[in-house]
Image (cartoon, rainbow, N blue to C red):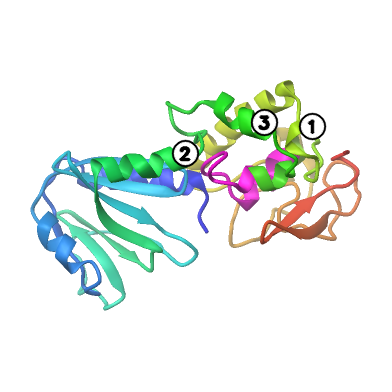
Amino acid sequence: MPEGHTIHRLAQDYAERFRGTTPRVTSPQGKFSDAADLLNGAGLTATEAHGKHLFLGFRATEWVHIHLGLFGKVTFGDAPAPPPTDTVRLRIATDTAYVDLRGPTTCALITGPEKQAVHDRLGPDPLRADADPNAAYRRISRSRTTIAALLMDQKVIAGVGNVYRAEVLFRHGIDPYRAGRDVTRAEWDALWADLVELMREGVRNNRIDTVRPEHTPEAMGRPPRVDDHGGEVYVYRRAERPCHICGGEIRTAGLAARNLFWCPTCQQP
């Protein structure tokens, strides 16, 4: 499932190509046809992301709510658009560009109040200007749940996925099994600030890189990481391999229905 930086990047990409236009809106697959007919030729006025949720605003009052889930995919291209396949849930097109959406968990036309209800159930997003890290810490500081699970709870903090979860905890030497209530305010402030910077960098580069300059392949004289997620990381998907810092073995275990990665030496309880 894409992490929050990807959704914010998609919001930017939609805006660059279609904001201020009156695009053709279709649903070749047919599952979004009624809504597409209502939006066809309407002005696309805004794009927005909150965590893993993408919103496309039409006529300033109607919103397409998209959640990619595990299988959703967005493909941009230049006009002329090729004939769509029957897997395209939503196509938006102008005389200069098109974008196809396939396989999302959610693709629905909603009202402004319905959109606000989505925001209300999500935690603060490190990439949003209106984010309140204090709101997240209030929940974390009262919880016996592990900090690793809390970071993945979208009601606590929105947009953090498995990669950022593993990497930010490593970067701050925090054991993923530590209870949220045992994370100090100073530690949380440092975690939040780091997530803001790492995720902003993810939006800029459209990939996740978390290693500090002194631990890059060039600095350490090691081969670059080869992975379909791209980017240089410390522990994510590096189980049983040596830690870049201490040389100890990276471990993995299941937690909150996802694989957790950490270094037992560098991340002390």
Tag 3, which secondary structure?
A: helix
Query: In the image shown, does 152 or 252 lie closer to the viewer?
Result: 152
Q: Residue at x 13, y 53 (%)?
A: 23
Q: Give above or below for 208 relative to 91.
A: above
Q: Position of residue 131 (x, y in %)?
A: 48, 28
Residue 46 figure quarter: top left
- Label 3, on which residue? 191
- Label 1, on which residue? 182
Amino acid on which the number 1 mark rests in the picture: Asp
Q: Earlier in the sequence, mark 2 or mark 1?
A: 1
Instruction: Say whether residue 216 is visible.
Output: no
Q: Position of residue 220 (x, y in %)?
A: 79, 42
Neighbourhood count class around disc 2 (C-alpha, 10 Å): few under 14, some 14–19, many 20 upward: some
Please state if 13 lies on the left or on the right of 231 as rendered: left
Neighbourhood count class around disc 1 (C-alpha, 10 Å): few under 14, some 14–19, many 20 upward: some
Amino acid on which the number 2 mark rests in the picture: Arg
- Label 2, on which residue? 204
Q: Residue at x 31, y 46 (%)?
A: 55
